[in-house]
Amino acid sequence: MRITFAFYECNNLGIEYLSAYLKNKGHEVALSFDPALFRSFTIHSERLHKIFDYKEVVVDQIVNSKPDLVGFSVVSDIYGWACEVAQEVKKRINVPVIFGGIHPSSVPEIVIAEDFVDYVCVGEGEEALLDLMSALERKQDTTKIKNIWAKKNGQVIDNPLRSLTANLDEFPFPDKELFYRHYPGFKSSYNIITARGCPFKCSFCYNSLILKKYGMSYLRQRSVDNVLAELKEAKKKFGIKRVFFVDDMFAYDPIWFEEFCRRYLREVGLPFTCEIHPSVTEEIVEKLKISGCVAVDIGVQTISEDIRKNILGRNETNDQIIKTLKLFMNTNIYVYVDIILGIPSQDKKELIDIIKFLKTYRPDYVLVNWLRCYPRTGIVNLMERGGLLSEEQVKEIDYGKEYMPFTYLGNTFDSETGKLGNLILISQMLPKRIIELLIRKGWYKKLNSSTFLPLRLYAIVVSIYSLLFSSKKRLLYFTPTWQLKYYAYWSFKKILMRFTKRKKVREER
């Protein structure tokens, strides 16, 4: 059996794990990839996107791969794209289509109702997808597979969840080559996950919904042996130079973390970045420092303790956050801080306070995002009860067809907040007196309000600023140089495809 996955903009660990698992069981796996040029989380231009749109290419690749099953692993932000691609595939070939991932797991009854969707996978997919492919191959009943929602005679069959695989070490290492074959540049940062799930229940995050389905048993950690074995294999096989741990929360288990730090530098020795809780101890910071960590991402989100606790479901205090930032000031670890705009009850005063806070405790890079409401999360329920979201707006969130990347759009976007958001973005590079003058005179209102300042331009400016004024290593995320190479590669490929197509048409005439 052959399954062809389709994905958008970046490499995806979920698909890589599914591919490795299915290949290990004797199935064939292919991938069709859309680079999302000029319609992504970092660069957006509808006019240019129409010129460099890869959707038609993606559909052709899927059809030409002659799949027995087509799979889409989607979050809400790319659900509309996945629906468009699936519809076009269905017009050309009679092949079953399955949707899985966070969005379908959140609203399976909505996704399965689409006429171009035959199956929906709710929750983890390795074993469920294997059972489905085996049933399709043997022409057996596909309507009684746990985790899989199916259709039969016009009726939806919603099967229960299966028990989770407790030992994550049982799964094979993710199939990185699936994406590397499409774009070798993905090798520049090796994405790896050491655990599944998160110990926290932030109201704006899908983890709060997953925990309702599975409970705390969803949170599982790979052994240090298994994680290091994957990285050592990746060094040998792909020549990786840096590591990005994409766990929702790294270092939550102190025993695991102690062993990891003790062994990582000696056995792997590559610079790495991770996401950590905004309240950490001096011991954790010191271990990150000596183990080779060069960057951390800290989700501060807001400096209003009331909003943080009662709306976002976060219990850390400002004192704890300040302590964490001060601890990192004394290291060479690059500090990213996440801020969310458009949170209910957030006002102009708090946004100005955020600017003052960041100027005082000086993280190296501020990631400013809009509040993006995802289906069935706690914050959606809270906003609906408070009259901040109408029934129709909640329905739109559940259906997820609107493209709304949280880097420059959100469910609560407004122009005044957008201008202050842009001021937050550039505040780190301006003297405190200039910032105070911009606020006092209201000159910040001259800033763009429809979207944030172009993020790649901002990244370039911060890179130059860091090079000139900071001894810390610069951005470990996808750098401006990486983006330029990415766009050059896919733009040239698209132009070449058009030239070849026109030449073939002329020859046929």
Image (cartoon, rainbow, N blue to C red):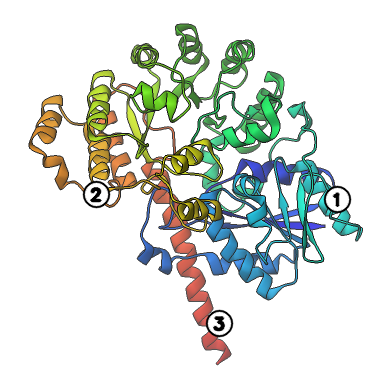
Residue at the disc numbered 3: 504
Between circles 3 and 2, the one closer to the viewer is: 2
**Would you place residue 288 above or below residue 446 in this image?**
above
Observer-side mark, 1 or 3, equals 1
C-alpha distance separating marks 1 and 2: 51 Å
306 shown above or below 257: below
Q: Identify the disc placed on residue 144.
A: 1
Q: Amino acid at mark 1?
A: Lys
**85 vs 421, nearest the viewer:** 421
Is residue 457 toward the left or the right of residue 335 in the image?
left
Which of the image's four quarters has the C terminus? bottom right
Circle 2: residue type: Ser
Is residue 294 shown left or right of residue 147?
left
For badge 3, the amino acid type reads: Lys
How far across and down, in percent of the image, does residue 200 sit?
A: 55, 25
Pinpoint residue 170: horizontal percent, then vertical percent.
79, 30
295 above or below 51?
above
Q: Nearer the viewer, residue 489 or 203?
A: 203
Tag 2, which secondary structure? loop
Work out whether residue 239 can be spotted.
Answer: no
**Circle 3: element type:** helix
Decide if residue 493 is on the left or right side of residue 107.
left
Q: Which residue is mark 2?
A: 449
Q: Which is more N-terminal, label 3 or label 1?
A: 1
Question: Which quadrant of the figure contains the N terminus?
Answer: bottom right
Q: Residue at x 25, y 41 (%)?
A: 422
Q: How busy is the neighbourhood of tag 2: few (under 14 within 10 Å), some, or many (20 plus)?
A: some
Which of the two labelled residues, at mark 1 and mark 2, occupies the earlier sequence position? 1
Helix, strand or loop at disc 1? loop
Q: In the image, residue 278 lies at what x, y percent?
A: 43, 20
**Residue furthest toward the top?**
283
Placement of 192 over or under 33, stated as above or below: above
